[in-house]
Image: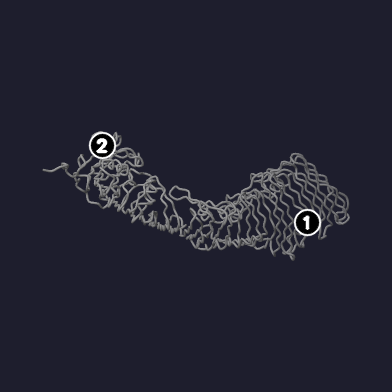
C-alpha cells in the first residue's frame, strides 16, 4: 500500500491471498488464491481462483467507489451447489450429485444501492451452463445445457436441453415484468422421470396414469403465455404424438392430438389413436379436474378397434360390460357424453353405441357361448345406472336384449329382458327348437327372479326360477310348465322314425343347487293324449314287444288314448310309481326310476291285453316285463328271464321321496298293486 491516508483517492494498494485446505461447513477449498488492486478509488479483482474436488472457479471484477454498478466475469467447473449449500444452508442443494464437473460462464453488471422492489434481479447478466452426468432424488441425467440472461426487467433461459436415457427435454423460458411469462417446451423423454420433483398431487396423479418403456417414443410441443409464472393460471397449448405406451393400463400403439391446458381444465382435440386392434379418433375430450367436480366430456369418440379397449381408458366398468359381448374386429363404436371419475358418478350421462353389420359378437349364458350376428345397440349410463340395448341375429332369427345394471360399489342389482325368435336348447340330451322366447330377469342384492316363456314343439313352455347368488353353491327353486307340445314333433326329436300325433303337457316344481344334479329335488306330472307309444322314451321299445303277442295287426294298437304319471326327483333319480298308458289293444302299468346322472333305468311294467280277438289268444291277459339300459336304448325282457340293473347306485329312500313330493306339491300316494290276473276262459 502507498499514498497519503488523508487522500484516499490517491492511494494505491495490492492484495494477494493464498490458502490450501480451507474448510467451511462441509465444503473444502483445496486451493484458494485472490489477487486484487486498489488505485485511486478503483477496485480491480484481477483474479479469484478456487479449486475443489470437481474443478476450478475463476472470477474477475471491477468497481469504482461510489459507482452504481459492478462489472464481473466468472467461469467455473467447481462444485457450485456444494459451495452455495455451505453458505446458504439449503438442503435441496444436497440432493444434487455431480459425476462430472459442471461448466458455468457468467458475465455482466451488478447494480448497487438502486435495487427497486419491482426488479427481478439487480443485475444484467448473460451466461451459459454445461453440465455432464448428475443425479438427484434417485434419477440420473446424462447432461444439462442452457443459455441464461437476467435484467432488472426479467429472467430468460434459452436453448435449455436436459438429456436422459429415455430422451430429452428442451425449454425456452421468459419471465418479464411487462411482457409476462412465456415458455416453449419440447418433451421427448419419459415424463414419469419427473415424479420425484413434482410437488402438486394433481400433476403427479396425471403423470402416473401413463406407462412408458424402452420402446416408447414421445414428441410433445407446448407453449404458454400468461401474466405470471403460475402454470395453473397460464394457458398452455400445443401438439403431441406418443407411441407405444399405456394409459390407465390400456395399451396404445400411437396417439396424436392438439392439447390445451388451463388450471383444472384439459382440452384434447383432433385426437387420432392407433391400437393393436384398430384405429380410433375423437373430435374432443374435455377434462375438468377440479377436486369438487371431476368429470370429462367425450365428443364424437369413434373407434373401429376393440369396442371395450378404447372405452376402458375412460370408463373401466362400462368397458367390462362391453367386453362380455366379445365383439369381432371392425365393430364401429361411438361415445358421447359426460363421465364422472374418481367416485363422481353423479356427473355420468353418456352413451356408447356400437354396430357391426358384417361382423359378430358372442355372449356366454349358463356356460354356453352364443354367437350374435350383425350386432348393434347402445349402452347409456346415467349416474350409477347402466342401461343397455342389444340387437342382432341369433340362430338365424331376431334377437333383442335390453336391461339395466347398477354399477354402484357394493350394490347388486340388474334387470334383463330378452326376446329371441329362435333359441335351441339341450334338454335330456336333445336340442329343442325354442321359438319366440321371452326371458325376464330381476336381480336385487344377489337374489334373481327369472321368468322365461316360449314356444317349442308346437306348444308353450314356461319357467319360473328363483336363484341366489349370495351362497355357494348357488341354490335355486322354480317351476317348469309345458302345454300341448306336439307329440309328433316330440317324437321327431327323441325318437326319429316313429311318427305320431297328439300332444303332451306337464309341470315340474323343484329346488336344487347350481352344478349339483344330486341336489335337484321336486315333483310333477306328465300327460300325453293320442300319442304314439313307440315314440316314448323308455316305454317306446316295449310297445313292439307287446305287439308281438297280438293275434293280428290291430290298427292303432300303439296309439295311446291317454298316458300319464306323476314323478319325483331326488338324489339324481327320477322316480315314478304310476305310469299308465292305454291304447285300443292294451293298457300298461309301470313303475321304476331313471338314474339321470349315470343314464341308467330300472323299470317294471305289467300289460293287460284288451279288445276283440284277444279272448281267443292262448296266453294270459297280463304280461310282466323288466326294463333296463339307458334312456335312449331301453331293453325290455319278460320278468321271468330276469334282467335289470346291478343296483350299483340305489334309488332314493322313501324319506327322500317324501321331501321331493312336498316340493313338487304332490301328496304321497299309496302304491297301487297291478290288476289281478284273470283266466282266459271263465266257468
Horizontal side, residue 218 vs residue 360: left or right: right
Q: Residue at x 32, y 53 (%)?
A: 504
* Closer-to-camera residue (179/636): 636
Per the image, label 2 sits on a secondary structure element best described as strand
Earlier in the chain: of badge 2 and badge 1, it is 1
Q: Residue at x 42, y 57 (%)?
A: 437
Q: In the displayed image of the protein, which residue is found farthest to the left?
A: 683
| Residue 546 occupies quadrant | top left
Up/down of 463 relative to 536, above or below = below
Q: Residue at x 45, y 48 (%)?
A: 368
Residue 662 lies, in percent from the top left, at: 25, 50
Horizontal side, residue 356 vs residue 98: left or right: left
* Quadrant location of the C terminus in the rendered image: top left
Does residue 264 appear in this view? no
Residue 171 lies, in percent from the top left, at: 73, 54
Q: How busy is the neighbourhood of tag 2: few (under 14 within 10 Å), some, or many (20 plus)?
A: some
Residue 378 lies, in percent from the top left, at: 52, 60
Circle 1 residue = 149
* Closer-to-camera residue (619/325): 619
Does residue 538 appear in this view? yes
Circle 2 residue = 638
Up/down of 383 relative to 373, above or below = below
* Closer-to-camera residue (537/398): 537
Q: Which mark is residue 100?
A: none
Per the image, label 1 sits on a secondary structure element best described as strand
Q: In the displayed image of the protein, which residue is found farthest to the bottom?
A: 178
Residue 525 lies, in percent from the top left, at: 28, 51
Residues under numbered marks 2 and 1 in contact, where contact means CB atoms less than 8 Å apart: no
Amino acid at each position: 500500500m502507498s499514498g497519503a491516508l488523508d487522500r484516499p483517492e490517491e492511494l494505491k494498494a495490492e492484495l494477494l491471498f493464498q490458502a490450501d485446505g480451507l474448510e467451511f461447513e462441509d465444503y473444502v477449498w483445496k486451493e484458494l488464491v485472490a489477487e486484487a488492486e486498489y488505485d485511486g478509488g478503483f477496485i480491480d479483482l484481477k483474479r479469484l481462483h478456487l479449486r475443489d474436488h470437481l474443478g476450478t472457479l475463476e472470477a474477475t471484477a471491477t468497481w469504482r467507489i461510489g459507482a452504481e454498478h459492478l462489472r464481473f466475469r466468472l467461469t467455473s467447473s467447481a462444485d457450485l451447489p456444494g459451495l452455495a449449500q455451505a453458505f446458504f444452508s439449503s438442503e435441496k442443494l444436497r440432493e444434487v450429485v455431480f459425476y462430472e464437473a459442471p461448466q458455468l460462464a457468467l458475465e455482466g453488471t451488478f447494480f448497487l444501492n438502486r435495487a427497486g422492489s419491482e426488479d427481478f434481479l439487480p443485475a444484467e447478466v448473460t451466461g451459459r451452463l454445461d453440465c455432464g452426468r448428475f443425479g438427484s432424488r434417485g434419477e440420473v441425467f446424462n447432461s444439462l445445457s442452457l443459455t441464461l440472461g437476467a435484467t432488472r426487467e426479467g429472467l430468460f433461459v434459452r436453448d435449455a436441453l436436459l438429456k436422459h436415457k429415455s430422451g430429452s427435454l428442451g425449454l425456452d423460458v421468459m419471465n418479464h415484468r411487462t411482457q409476462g411469462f412465456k415458455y416453449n417446451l419440447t418433451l421427448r423423454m419419459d415424463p414419469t422421470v419427473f415424479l420425484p420433483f413434482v410437488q402438486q398431487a394433481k400433476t403427479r396423479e396425471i403423470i402416473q396414469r401413463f406407462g412408458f418403456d424402452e420402446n416408447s417414443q414421445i414428441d410433445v410441443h407446448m407453449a404458454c403465455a400468461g401474466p405470471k409464472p403460475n402454470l395453473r393460471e397460464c394457458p398452455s397449448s400445443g401438439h403431441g404424438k406418443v407411441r407405444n405406451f399405456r394409459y390407465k393400463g390400456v395399451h396404445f400403439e400411437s396417439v396424436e392430438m392438439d392439447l390445451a391446458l388451463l388450471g383444472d381444465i384439459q382440452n384434447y382435440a383432433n385426437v387420432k389413436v392407433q391400437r393393436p386392434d384398430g384405429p380410433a379418433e375423437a373430435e374432443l375430450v374435455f377434462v375438468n379436474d377440479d377436486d369438487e367436480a371431476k368429470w370429462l366430456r367425450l365428443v364424437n369418440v369413434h373407434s373401429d378397434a376393440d369396442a371395450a379397449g378404447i372405452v376402458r381408458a375412460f370408463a373401466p366398468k362400462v368397458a367390462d360390460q362391453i367386453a362380455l359381448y366379445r365383439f369381432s374386429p371392425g365393430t364401429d363404436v361411438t361415445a358421447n357424453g359426460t363421465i364422472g371419475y374418481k367416485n363422481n358418478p353423479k356427473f355420468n350421462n353418456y352413451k356408447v353405441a356400437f354396430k357391426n353389420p358384417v361382423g359378430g359378437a358372442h355372449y356366454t349364458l349358463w356356460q354356453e357361448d352364443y354367437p350374435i350376428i350383425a350386432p348393434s345397440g347402445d349402452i347409456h349410463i346415467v349416474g350409477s345406472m347402466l342401461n343397455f340395448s342389444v340387437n342382432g341375429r341369433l340362430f338365424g332369427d331376431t334377437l333383442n336384449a335390453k336391461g339395466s345394471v347398477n354399477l354402484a360399489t357394493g350394490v347388486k342389482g340388474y334387470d334383463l329382458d330378452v326376446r329371441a325368435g329362435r333359441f335351441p336348447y339341450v334338454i335330456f340330451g336333445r336340442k329343442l327348437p325354442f321359438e319366440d322366447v321371452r326371458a325376464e330377469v330381476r336381480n336385487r342384492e344377489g337374489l334373481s327372479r327369472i321368468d322365461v316363456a316360449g314356444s317349442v314343439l308346437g306348444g308353450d313352455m314356461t319357467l319360473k326360477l328363483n336363484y341366489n347368488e349370495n351362497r355357494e353353491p348357488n341354490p335355486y327353486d322354480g317351476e317348469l310348465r309345458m302345454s300341448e307340445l306336439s307329440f309328433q314333433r316330440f317324437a321327431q326329436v327323441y325318437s326319429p322314425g316313429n311318427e305320431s300325433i297328439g300332444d303332451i303337457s306337464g309341470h315340474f316344481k323343484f329346488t336344487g343347487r347350481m352344478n349339483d344334479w344330486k341336489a335337484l329335488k321336486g315333483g310333477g306330472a306328465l300327460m300325453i293324449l293320442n300319442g304314439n307309444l313307440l315314440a316314448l322314451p323308455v316305454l317306446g321299445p316295449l310297445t313292439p314287444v307287446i305287439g308281438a303277442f297280438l293275434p293280428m295287426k290291430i290298427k292303432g294298437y300303439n296309439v295311446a288314448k291317454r298316458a300319464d304319471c306323476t314323478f319325483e326327483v331326488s338324489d339324481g333319480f327320477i322316480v315314478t310309481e304310476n305310469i299308465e298308458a292305454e291304447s285300443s289293444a292294451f293298457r300298461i302299468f309301470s313303475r321304476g326310476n331313471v338314474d339321470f346322472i349315470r343314464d341308467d333305468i330300472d323299470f317294471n311294467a305289467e300289460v293287460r291285453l284288451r279288445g276283440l280277438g284277444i279272448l281267443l289268444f292262448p296266453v294270459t291277459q297280463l304280461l310282466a316285463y323288466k326294463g333296463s339300459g339307458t334312456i335312449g336304448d331301453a331293453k325290455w325282457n319278460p320278468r321271468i328271464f330276469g334282467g335289470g340293473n346291478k343296483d350299483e347306485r340305489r334309488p332314493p329312500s322313501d324319506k327322500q321321496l317324501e321331501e321331493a313330493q312336498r316340493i313338487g306339491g304332490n301328496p304321497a300316494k299309496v302304491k297301487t298293486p297291478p290288476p289281478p290276473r284273470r283266466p282266459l276262459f271263465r266257468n
